[in-house]
Each structure stands twice: as structure tokens, then as C-alpha cells.
């Protein structure tokens, strides 16, 4: 069972070496992450960005850029377009955000001509190394889909279940999170949760067990679920938390990192290739965790182990 990023790192060494195209890869934390990925034989990288700034920051941090290709494009958006083109043309296998705004980065990832969009809805997934839970915890969506509809949430569940299965969770338990664990007509997120839970009961999802509404505490804490007399396989044991909107998803995942010091990885799933989307303020450990996770997913892609199930409407 995979419980932390160190477990993942051990697994990826049997895969062919993957190359990461980093958009605006100029900041110190990103440079640390890609040099560590090189030194630990995790991945190769090509940095697309302001070469002068890249070398200046690397020198300030005493980072050796040997064997790391640099393509000198100072403008962040133009750098991102050049980086995503490398992935779409097969010259790199992973697309990563450096020091560029997320909306600009995502527009490049979704570019109609050279982007990585597919027929799937793409969603952002925070992977949390929840050591106190002794498992990985997946939170979606905290960086891409602003206010997902019921149909969007169904597709987000399908994507995220597929990702969790890559991480060796055979039947992921999915909690649809709201402020309360009862259906309240005045709280739309509870209505969506009830509908998604019923869809799961009727076999409309491929893989995974979906239940909700559940509050955060009784979704991941068995004692909280027991105290509130909430039964079922998901309550207290969720692997995936589907949040009502981007605000709650972003806040919960970032509070884990910045209040507890926990390590997270941020990925976009459902595209033609893995996309690493960290926050610009993420610690170097989180950016390295994102690289490790994306390389693992890319390896699964290469060995045809990625199967995104359909939602039956």
C-alpha cells in the first residue's frame, strides 16, 4: 500500500526516464526540485524561461544545473506555450508550472492547437501525505474548476477515482464534502452530494464508493463518524474528498500544508499527459512531491495502466 511520497519514489525507478518541461522555471524552489529530481534519478528536465534569471537564482542557491536543458524565453506565457509544445510533440512527457500565474499556465495547457486537452473534463487534485491517517488523501478541485455543476462533480469523481487506483487504492472511498452530513434544501452542496451518492448506489460510476453529504471531520475521522452515528464504508475512511467549490478545496489543502507543515502534490488529471500544478508559494518538498507523483502517473500511462471510467447518465 502506498502511504507516502517515499513509497512512490521507490516504485518509479523501474520506469523509463521521463522528461519534464517546466514553464517559467525560474524560481528557487522549482530549481531545487528539478535538480533534486535529476540527482535522485527521478526525472530529467528542460527549463523554459528567462535564462539569466534561472542561472542567477541557481547560483544564489548553489544549485548545479548540469544536464538540465534551458530554453531562453523571458516572457512567462510564451515560455509556457513553448513548454507545452514540447509535451504535445512528445519531446517531454510532463508539463510543470514554474513561476507563472495559474490561469496563464492553464490557458496554455488547454490551448486548442498545442495544448493537452482531451474529451475528458480536467480537474486539479491535491495529494496529501497524511501521515496521521497513514494513507494518501486526495482533495479535488482546488485550482481549476471554480464552481462545478453536478455533472462536473460526477466527471471529477470519475477522474479522481482513476488517479487513486493508479496509486494502488483498488476501490477508492469518495466523500462528497459539505458543512453538514444531512441533506438541507437551503445548502445546494448537500443536494449534489445526495444525488452523487444515489448515482453510486445505482452503479453509475466505474469504480469507487461515493457517499455524502459528509462534513470534513466525519469524512476522515472514524471516531467523529461513530460519534455522529454515521455508517457506511466511506464515513471516517475517505480516500477522496470532493469539495463543493474551488475556494473550499484550495483552502483545505493549503491549510494542511501551511498550518501543519504537511507535504502536498498538485496534479491536473484527465489531460494527454500529466500536468504538475503547484502553487508558486509551495515549498521545494511539495514541488518535488509533485514531480515524483507525475512521473509515477506518466509511468502508468506508458504501461497502459490508466483507465478513466465513464459516468453513466
Image (cartoon, grey):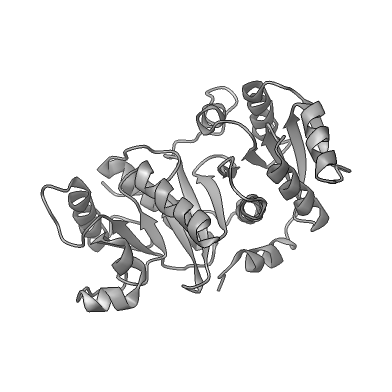
Res 154 visible: yes
Residue at the far left: name it: 185
Residue placed most toward the observer, 299 or 147? 147
Task: Using the rendered view, name the quadrant where residue 178 is placed.
Answer: bottom left
Q: Point out residue 97 in the picture as x, y percentages from the top left corner.
A: 62, 37
Residue placed most toward the observer, 293 or 306? 293
Res 307 visible: no
Taking 45 as reference, is 4 left or right? left
Taking 258 as reference, is 284 left or right? right
Q: Point out residue 68 in the picture as x, y percentages from the top left corner.
A: 83, 40
Residue found 28% across the figure and 55% down from its top: 204
Residue placed most toward the observer, 105 or 199? 105
Q: Point out residue 171 in the picture as x, y percentages from the top left corner.
A: 41, 67
Residue found 54% across the figure and 25% down from its top: 111
Residue found 78% across the figure and 37% down from its top: 57
Q: Point out residue 137 in the picture as x, y percentages from the top left corner.
A: 46, 62
Taking 42 as reference, is 62 left or right? right
On-image quarter of the N terminus = bottom right
Up-down relation of residue 95 to residue 227 (above or below): above
Residue found 35% across the figure and 72% down from its top: 221
Taking 196 as reference, is 82 left or right? right
Q: How many marks?
A: 0
Amino acid at each position: 500500500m502506498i502511504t507516502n511520497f517515499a513509497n512512490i519514489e521507490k516504485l518509479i525507478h523501474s520506469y523509463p526516464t521521463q522528461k519534464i518541461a517546466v514553464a517559467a522555471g525560474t524560481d528557487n524552489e522549482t530549481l531545487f526540485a528539478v535538480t533534486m529530481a535529476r540527482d535522485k534519478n527521478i526525472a530529467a528536465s528542460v527549463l523554459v524561461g528567462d535564462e539569466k534569471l534561472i542561472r542567477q537564482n541557481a547560483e544564489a542557491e548553489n544549485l548545479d544545473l548540469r544536464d538540465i536543458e534551458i530554453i531562453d524565453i523571458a516572457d512567462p506565457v510564451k515560455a509556457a506555450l513553448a513548454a507545452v509544445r514540447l509535451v504535445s510533440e512528445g519531446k517531454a512527457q510532463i508539463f510543470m508550472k514554474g513561476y507563472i500565474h495559474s490561469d496563464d499556465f492553464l490557458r496554455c495547457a488547454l490551448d486548442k492547437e498545442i495544448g493537452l486537452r482531451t474529451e475528458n473534463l480536467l480537474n486539479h487534485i491535491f495529494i496529501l501525505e497524511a501521515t496521521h491517517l497513514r494513507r494518501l488523501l486526495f482533495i479535488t478541485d482546488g485550482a481549476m474548476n471554480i464552481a462545478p455543476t453536478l455533472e462536473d462533480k460526477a466527471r471529477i469523481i470519475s477522474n479522481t477515482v482513476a488517479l487513486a487506483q493508479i496509486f494502488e487504492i483498488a476501490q477508492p472511498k469518495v466523500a462528497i464534502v459539505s458543512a453538514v452530513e444531512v441533506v438541507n434544501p437551503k445548502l445546494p452542496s448537500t443536494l449534489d452530494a445526495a444525488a452523487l451518492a444515489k448515482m453510486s448506489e445505482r452503479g453509475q460510476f466505474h469504480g469507487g464508493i461515493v457517499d455524502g453529504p459528509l462534513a470534513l471531520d466525519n469524512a476522515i475521522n472514524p471516531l467523529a463518524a461513530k460519534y455522529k452515528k454515521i455508517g457506511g464504508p466511506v464515513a471516517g475512511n475517505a480516500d477522496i474528498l470532493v469539495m463543493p467549490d474551488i475556494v473550499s478545496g484550495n483552502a483545505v489543502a493549503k491549510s494542511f500544508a501551511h498550518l501543519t507543515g504537511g507535504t502536498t502534490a498538485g496534479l491536473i488529471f484527465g489531460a494527454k499527459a500529466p500536468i504538475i500544478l503547484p502553487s508558486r508559494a509551495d515549498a521545494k518538498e511539495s514541488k518535488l512531491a509533485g514531480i515524483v507523483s507525475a512521473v509515477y502517473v506518466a509511468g502508468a500511462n506508458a504501461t497502459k495502466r490508466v483507465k478513466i471510467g465513464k459516468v453513466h447518465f
